[in-house]
Amino acid sequence: MYLQPTTYLRPTTIDEVIGALARQGGRILAGGTDFFPTQGDRPIAGPVLDISAIDALRGIRVEPDQIRIGARTTWSELIAADLPPMFDGLKAAAREVGGWQIQNQGTVAGNLCNASPAADGVPPLLALDAAVELAGPAGRRVLPLDQFILGPRRTALGTDELLVAILVPRRFETARSRFMKLGARRYLVISIVMVAAQVALDERGCVADARIAVGSCSAVACRLPALEQALLGAEARRGLAARVQPEHLAPLRPIDDLRATAAYRLDAALTLVGRALDACVLEPAHA
């Protein structure tokens, strides 16, 4: 069988990437931690655009109204960054992404573009009310994360677009956030259920804002708006978990698979959501 040679490009600017995508299309290569495993034994087909040399896509920047996470920012860089408490949940998720080698190489943005139902970064970023910035020939556009990920391995990214940054609003910087993950073992495992929770308190010590997201229990990780509304005004003390009711999990659509049954996932999600909420109000902030 004759194989066409693969075109490999390593641009140094965002404009170069967009121009190449518009001319010939191609697959984006960042950290490669999803790119190569999903390739398997198949030969790489089509152009490859390696964005690892684009410095403008790297780093975390604090802006007046938001915190900007560049598309080339790795999990290790996120963990090491000096960020407010509302990022504790995302940092905890970062520590669950494979081993140190994967965390050193893999990017936060790549995790979103891969669009796995079990992507560790999605629930905490949903709880942070994150959005993504996309660049293409027509300019730049911003999409809320829940409008960017459309389904398993499907996103709203156009074939001529590049995800350039993740944007997190600074509304509740002192909010307490947690991430919890259930798998067949403690580390290096695809999750059965994962939960991210963020709770902001008012001056009376009551819940002023709550955001809870669950992953691995539906085609796309999702928030629990009915529970978020039910928590408003509640005292931030032990027992907050008791407010979580099965009907609050209505947005979830778990499936039976090799890792767990749908019924087990729902029961585990109910437990983990409660634990995450109690941890938000009882445990000290993490570094």
Image: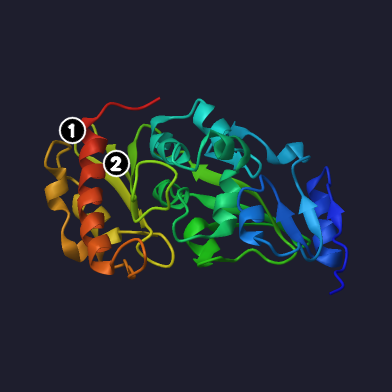
Query: In the rendered picture of this protein, how many numbered marks are placed on residues?
Result: 2
Q: Indicate whether 274 appears above or below 160.
A: above
Residue 100 falls left or right of residue 127: right
Q: How is the image coloured?
A: rainbow
Kind of residue indicated by mark 2: Val
Residue located 46% across and 52% down the image: 122
Disc nearest the viewer among 1 and 2: 2
Looking at the picture, how far across and down is residue 232, in whole percent?
A: 21, 48
Tell me, yes or no, whether the two marked residues, 1 and 2, touch with CB atoms within 8 Å: no
Where residue 17 appears, x then y in whole percent?
80, 53
Q: Secondary structure at mark 1?
A: loop
Q: Nearer the viewer, residue 189 or 54?
A: 189
Q: Quadrant of the N terminus?
A: bottom right
Is 201 on the left-hand or right-hand side of 116? Answer: left
Q: Which mark is residue 82?
A: none
Q: CA distance from mark 1 to mark 2?
A: 14 Å
**Which kind of residue does numbered mark 1 sit on?**
Arg
Residue 28 x %, y %: 72, 55
Whether residue 173 is situated above or below residue 241 in the rendered picture: above
Dot 1 alpha-carbon crowd within 10 angstroms: few under 14, some 14 to 19, many 20 or more: few
Mark 1 or mark 2, earlier in chain = 2
Figure check: 36 above or below 85: below
Q: Which residue is mark 2?
A: 199
Which residue does the image show at 31% across and 67% down from the upper left?
251
- For the point 50% across and 60% down, the residue is 116
Q: Nearer the viewer, residue 165 or 257?
A: 257
Label disc, if present, on residue 204 of the rendered structure: 1
Is 177 situated left or right of 46 in this image? left
Secondary structure beneath dot 2 equals: strand
